[in-house]
Amino acid sequence: MANFRPALIVVDLQEDFCPPNGSLAVTNGRDIAPLVNKLLASPFVIRIATKDWHPHDHVSFAANHQGKVPFEDLITIVNPYNEAETYESRLWPVHCVQGSPGAELIPELLTSQIDMVLEKGADPRIEVYSPFYDPFKSPRVYDSGIVKILREKQVTDVYVVGLAADYCVKNAAVDAAKEGFKTYLVEECTRAVDPSAWSECKKEIEISGAKVVSMDGPEVSRLMTAQ
Ligand SMILES: [Zn+2]
């Protein structure tokens, strides 16, 4: 067990991603809180929560693009420092505006057990799903510093939970695995925007080297017994 130094990342468990009032509510999103709290009670080296944290003029809001429809339309996002680099990204309803009630972590979450809160998505020009860095992987655009923090804590294993499974949680797990951490996405502690595509999405996550695991599986029971 000496080489087992687990970290927990709780992704975007915020009001706007939860029923009943969230502007981008993920079906049953709030229901994961009790199991996330159970994990938070385990002996992690560090527990990090992330928050989607957008300005009003954020590029991912359909309302900021004339005639565009949230959930359906895409927009081309350009690297502000290299316009040859672009990617297509989905448009959403206005959500998680900095300082708004929708951007709050849900009150069911045991925030007293969280060591650090990282904010992402503050640059109006860029969509950032991963709490690690922006899709261009340009430190000039966005780098949360999370890799440095995990390495300083000598973390070996990263557990990822939160919302939403098919966007920010997926990207967090994929980037953690790419950075060389043994990575586990705990399936009961997440919910997808599009549950019908979740099994396909799981395959993409596992290709990155991250594992989708269960609360009842050995990867989680190991946490409960580790010290
Ligand atoms: Zn967002």
Image (cartoon, grey):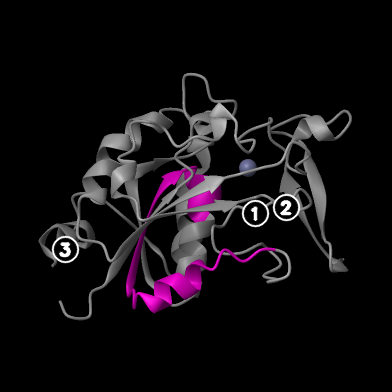
**Residues packed near mark 2 inside 10 Å, few (<14), some (14 to 19) or many (20 plus):** some
The response on whether ligand 1 sits within 8 Å of label 1 is: yes
| Residue at the far left in the pictured view | 225
Q: Which residues are magenta?
A: 142-170
Q: Quickly name the residue at label 3.
A: 222
Q: Nearer the viewer, mark 3 or mark 1?
A: 1
Q: Nearer the viewer, mark 1 or mark 2?
A: 2
Q: Quadrant of the C terminus?
A: bottom left
Q: Give the alpha-carbon distance from disc 1 to disc 2, as whole Å.
A: 9 Å
Callouts 1 and 2 close, C-beta under 8 Å? yes
Say if 35 sits above or below 177 in the image. above
Residue position marked by numbered label 2 in the rendering: 123
Q: Nearer the viewer, residue 114 or 32?
A: 114
The residue where tag 1 is placed is 128
Element class at badge 2: loop
Q: Nearer the viewer, mark 2 or mark 3?
A: 2
Q: Nearer the viewer, residue 195 or 79?
A: 79
- The residue positioned 77% from the left and 33% from the top of the image is 62
Amino acid on which the number 1 mark rests in the picture: Val
